């Protein structure tokens, strides 16, 4: 793929904040569950939540930092792999981009 269409790039930039907030809403809930896990000491709860946050930080950096048009495809592939971007989100992009992502993720 040579580069994203202008319409795909514009949609991607507009969609990123929504994807981030939706993803973090779910992850914050998971972290809250770790912080309040029954049968664990407060220390265990803290370190479990801390480890989860470190893992999620790496995912967020991989997917959301330094967006450029030339890196959009790879960012979208990572977002798909991490569950940040789903099929419904992809429906608004060009068929060419959807096909390329599908082929990349399946291959």
Image (spheres, grey):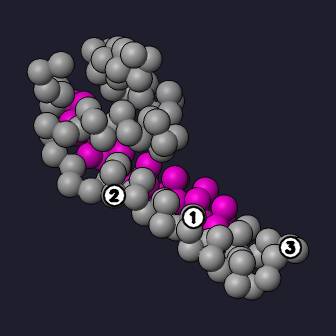
Q: What residue did someone put label 2 on?
A: 61
In the rendered image, residue 9 lying in the magenta stretch gets the answer: yes
Tell me how far mark 3 sits from mark 1, CA to CA.
17 Å
Q: Is residue 92 left or right of residue 4?
A: right
Q: Secondary structure at mark 1?
A: helix
Range of magenta residues: 7-32
* Residue 91 screen position, x and y as percent: 43, 24
Q: What residue did someone put label 3 on?
A: 38
Question: Which residue is at the front of the view, 81 or 89?
Answer: 81
Q: Earlier in the sequence, mark 2 or mark 1?
A: 1
Tell me how far mark 2 sits from mark 1, CA to CA.
14 Å
Compared to 30, does 6 lie above or below?
Answer: above
Q: Residue furthest bottom?
A: 42
Q: Earlier in the sequence, mark 3 or mark 1?
A: 3
Q: Is residue 35 visible?
A: yes
When asked about the image quadrant of residue 31, the answer is bottom right
State which quarter of the image contains the N terminus.
top left
Tell me how far mark 3 sits from mark 2, CA to CA.
31 Å
* Residue 92 screen position, x and y as percent: 38, 27
* Residue 82 screen position, x and y as percent: 48, 42
Q: Please give the name of the residue rendered at 46% of the width and 36% of the height, measured from the top-left corner.
A: 81
Q: Is residue 37 left or right of residue 52?
A: right
Q: Residue furthest right?
A: 39
Number of marks: 3
Compared to 28, does 1 lie above or below?
Answer: above
Q: Is residue 94 visible?
A: no
Question: Which residue is at the front of the view, 17 or 100?
Answer: 100
Label 1 Cα neighbours within 10 Å, binned few <14 / some 14-19 / many ≥20: some
Question: Which residue is at the front of the view, 93 or 72?
Answer: 72
Question: Which residue is at the front of the view, 104 or 96?
Answer: 104
């Amino acid at each position: 793929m040579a580069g994203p269409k202008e319409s795909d790039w514009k949609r991607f930039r507009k969609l990123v904040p929504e994807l981030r907030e939706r993803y973090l809403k779910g992850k914050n809930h998971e972290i809250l569950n770790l912080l309040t896990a029954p049968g664990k000491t407060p220390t265990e709860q803290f370190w479990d939540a801390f480890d989860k946050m470190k893992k999620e930080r790496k995912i967020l950096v991989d997917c959301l930092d330094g967006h450029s048009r030339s890196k959009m495809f790879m960012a979208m592939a990572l977002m798909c792999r991490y569950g940040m971007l789903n099929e419904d989100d992809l429906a608004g992009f060009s068929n060419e981009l959807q096909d390329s992502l599908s082929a990349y993720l399946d291959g």
